[in-house]
Amino acid sequence: MSRQLHLNAFLMSTGHHEASWRLPESDPFANTSVEHYQRLAQLAERGLFDSIFFADSPVLFGNVGRRPAGSLEPTVLLTAIASVTSRIGLIATASTTYNEPYNLARRFASVDHVSGGRAGWNVVTTAGPEAARNFNLADQPAHAERYERAAEFLEVAYQLWDSWRDDAAIADKDSGVWAVQERVVPIDHVGRHFQVRGPLNLPRSPQGHPLIVQAGSSEDGKGLAARYAEAVFTAQQTLEDAQDFYRDLKARAVAHGRDPSTVKILPGIVPVIGSTVEEAERLEHRLDSLIRPEYARLQLARTLRVAPEDLPFDQQLPADLPDEDEIEGAKSRYTLIVTLARREKLTVRELIGRLGGGRGHRTFTGTPEQVADAIQHWFEAGAADGFNVMPPVLPSGLETFVDEVIPILQARGLFRTSYSGSTLRDHYGLPRPAGRTAALQEATA
């Protein structure tokens, strides 16, 4: 079979455009509605998406006046979604900076059991001092330290997931032995950041390991992704930047002894779709006209580490912004925003409009055919293995994509016409990893 696209649906309350909640058809309280997300997941499953994805942060971010604020804890939400879907992958974000490996490994293994092998974990290190102050810290740990902790965190999680052999539970009613004790072993991890005895209090899950996803594009982020990630969500504005990122990350994976085809790179795309170009542009302009610029400027100032008054709406960004090396959080997003503004000589007002739809992800406005063309072009040009689809308005944007873009991609032989497996690893064409405990025990037998 020829290479095919992987598509993930990134779900966010009323949509990714920050003003989507203001449309008459939007439910401004959808952010806490389980039924809303269940319907979206069923819609994405009808479209044969590989997965759905929820971002998350352990902090109330930004001004609550700007858009629907607050979100359900995503692993809890995924269990509710698992009950009304059967094939689509279920990916949630969780921080390695503000969690402990045992609890998080157990949580994602539980989602994998509940869903029959459809769980994925988007590993983040969480930027910003606001989150730190919710966890007994005065400020965020340094960028490099957060990524060092994340690598050790993942190593501990892998050991915990593998602390049960696949054949540990035998449920032998005649002998009265439910599981073989020798096939469940402590991990006895002692490292710089963690000391974890183990084993996990849960048998090995259907996928062995939940799918690992990563979304940071800084040097440290790419290093972590190259070692561990099986899917990478990234924000890229131009084809050339996306190609460079793609080549770089695949080469880094090879340097770690990995098959580059097992690392799927999925740039974000915000598709603003209309039956004609004019209709799509009207929707885009309508959404942009509903942005409250004073809220957006506050957020931009926070990202750029400057005062709001240093960002006059009708002037370009100041020349003396901090260097990326001075930024301890969200380095890659900072660089993307500054590069976009400088490259296109955008005023602050224009930049706010460009960021309103996808916070730095590529926005594409056009007909279903044009959206399919744009996806195919990047896919075939070595810039992507698929896309993280970010509808600007939900549910209508996802409905249009499923009903009008997906059939075009299928007709071109670029996307599946049915699911061929039942787990998230099946969708990504990835094998179920062998348990480390079994291999260790066999080696020492």
Image: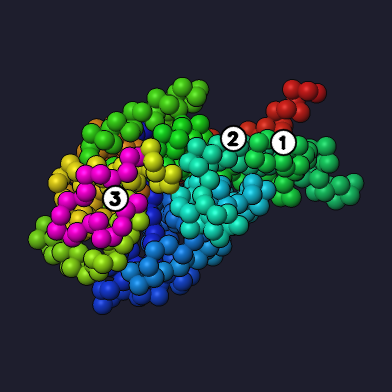
Decide whether the magenta segment is chiefly helix, strand or loop: loop
Check disc 2 and give the amino acid type: Pro
Q: For the point 26% across and 77% down, which residue is it?
A: 24
How many numbered marks, from 0 up? 3
Q: Nearer the viewer, residue 304 or 37?
A: 304
The quadrant in which residue 297 appears is bottom left
Q: For the point 72% across and 42% down, which residue is it?
A: 196
- Give the extent of the magenta segment: 305-324
Q: Secondary structure at mark 1?
A: strand
Farthest residue, direction right: 175
Q: Are marks 3 and 1 in contact (CB under 8 Å)?
A: no
Work out whether mark 3 precedes mark 1 in sequence or the reverse, and give the earlier one.
1
Work out whether mark 2 precedes mark 3 in sequence or the reverse, and give the earlier one.
3
Q: For the point 46% across and 32% down, which residue is it?
A: 223
> Can you give x and y, in whole percent of width and height, for residue 249 in the image?
39, 31
Residue at label 1? 190
Q: Residues within 10 Å of mark 1 (few under 14, many from 20)?
A: few
Residue at label 2? 433
Q: Is residue 165 left or right of residue 93?
A: right
- Magenta highlight on residue 218: no
The quadrant in which residue 284 appears is bottom left
Q: Is residue 204 left or right of residue 361?
A: right
* Mark sitting on residue 360: 3
Q: Secondary structure at mark 3?
A: loop
> Can you give x and y, in whole percent of width and height, for residue 98 in the image?
57, 52
Q: Secondary structure at mark 2?
A: loop
* Quarter placement of the N terminus: top left
Residue 243 vertical placement versus 142 (above, below): above
Q: Residues within 10 Å of mark 3 (few under 14, many from 20)?
A: many
